[in-house]
Image (cartoon, rainbow, N blue to C red):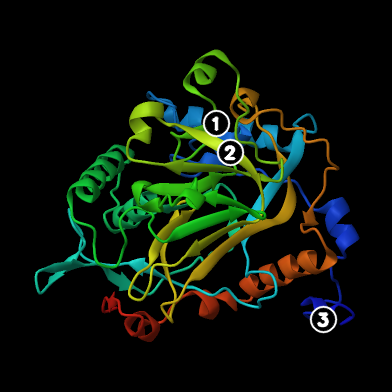
Amino acid sequence: DDSRADEGMEDAGNGFIWSDEDLTEYFPAIAQMPLGTANDFGHTLGWGHKYPGAHAIGARRAVAAERALHEWISAVISPASRVVNFDLWGFMPLPGQEQCDFKVCELGGEQGWNPKTKINGNSHLVMKEAALPVPLFACLYFSAGMGAYLLSRFQINRRKSPLSNKLEYGRQIAGILTESVPSQLHPGLHGVSISCGSTPYFPPRSSEGNDGRRYREVGFLNVNWQAGMAHGADRAPVLGRVCSSREPAKFNDAKVDMFRLKVASAFRNGTSYQTDKKEGPMTLTYAGGEGKGLFFQWDGEARFAFSPSGGPFNINLRKILNIPVVLGHEFDARVTGDPDNGAKLEFAFSGETDAERKAARLRILRCVRGELNAELNASREEIVAAGFLCQEQ
């Protein structure tokens, strides 16, 4: 049955293809088991920050862990467990374009305090070809700037225990703050501009000549946890933050909860971000010039983005899917807000028009087939041609 071949859903051999109606009515609700030690998706939906049984201690630890696992599975399949909608955002080409206009690679270099290489007295970052996954689904959060650069440096120096990893993060933060800015980057977020929908968002007061170089990071939350530590609430003056209840970042309101951070933000607000609810899509434009690029991260994956031509490029994210998810017994509405968004509970491709919904479907299918790898992941030759050093594989 090749009746839907033009939508990228040709018959693969078994004669069965899910229709849009089948997906809407029968697509199963999702619950994620946290297998690591800091799972923001599981934490947000109430299934735990760590794997079931992680807190079991004593001689009967194995028995307690097994009991916790059985209880976790029983809760997931229980008809009494609540099912709600969840927004899934995605990296998409700009409207009217077939492909994204940027390439990605990863930070290379040696393990240690500083991954940079000295050439003629100047410090340079060394890149390498990116591994999978390619940027498509943004389930949790997105940001560009210092946090993504930090994560890239940490990935080179990942340790075996959670405590050692936290200490490594501290070491890399100290390095970034005390070292000179490498020649492949601009200070702060110079060259970065962001619009949400059709409204400019960053830099703030850009019409007055405000520049992004004083900011260290900009991005959005979809869930209200980042790295198990940070969360956000609507922007308010100091008195309002202390004396009023503010709307948290919500995972199914079809909006991005934008934030922008300076170095001093952590001292003023701690791990609580001041956020601004904005309509999508969120489009980041980088105009840094030849030999420059930008670190960005999504859901804990960090990459370095650049334009092969040296011209401006755009990182565009919009809602591409609505999926049903199961809430666990640890779900806390104080952190996420009321999860009932009043919409029909369903699996659905998202977009304001049929063309946008079709584009989301085709983009996902292209990713499944591996076709986005060549579009987004830069080859060694492309990295070198853009003026960057490339690590030998």
The residue that appears at 75% across and 31% down in the rendered structure is 81
Q: Nearer the viewer, mark 3 or mark 1?
A: 1
Q: Within 10 Å of the Cα at label 2, are there few (<14), some (14-19), or many (20+) other Cα atoms? A: many
241 shown above or below 226: above
Tag 1 or tag 3, which sits nearer the N-term?
Answer: 3
Query: Percent from the top left, x then y, of residue 346?
Result: 82, 48
Q: Please, which residue is most extreme toward the left here?
A: 121
Q: In the rendered image, which quarter is residue 180 located in?
A: bottom left
The residue that appears at 78% across and 36% down in the rendered structure is 341
Q: Mark 2: which secondary structure?
A: strand
Q: In the rendered image, which quarter is residue 302 located in?
A: bottom left
Mark 2 — residue? 276
Look at the image and tell me whether residue 84 can be seen.
yes
327 shown above or below 136: above
Taking 368 as reference, is 286 left or right?
left
The residue that appears at 45% across and 51% down in the rendered structure is 300
Residue kind at label 3, given as amino acid type: Asp
Look at the image and tell me whether residue 52 can be seen.
no
Mark 3 — residue? 6
Residue kind at label 1, given as amino acid type: Arg
Q: Mark 1: which secondary structure?
A: loop
289 shown above or below 261: below
Residue nearest the viewer, comparing 210 with 88 = 210
Q: Please, which residue is most extreme toward the top here?
A: 243
Q: Mark 3: which secondary structure?
A: helix
Mark 1 — residue? 235
Tag 3 or tag 2, which sits nearer the N-term?
Answer: 3
Residues under labels 3 and 1: Cα distance?
A: 45 Å
Circle number at residue 385: none
Tag 1 or tag 2, which sits nearer the N-term?
Answer: 1
Residues under labels 2 and 3: Cα distance?
A: 39 Å
Q: Nearer the viewer, mark 2 or mark 3?
A: 2
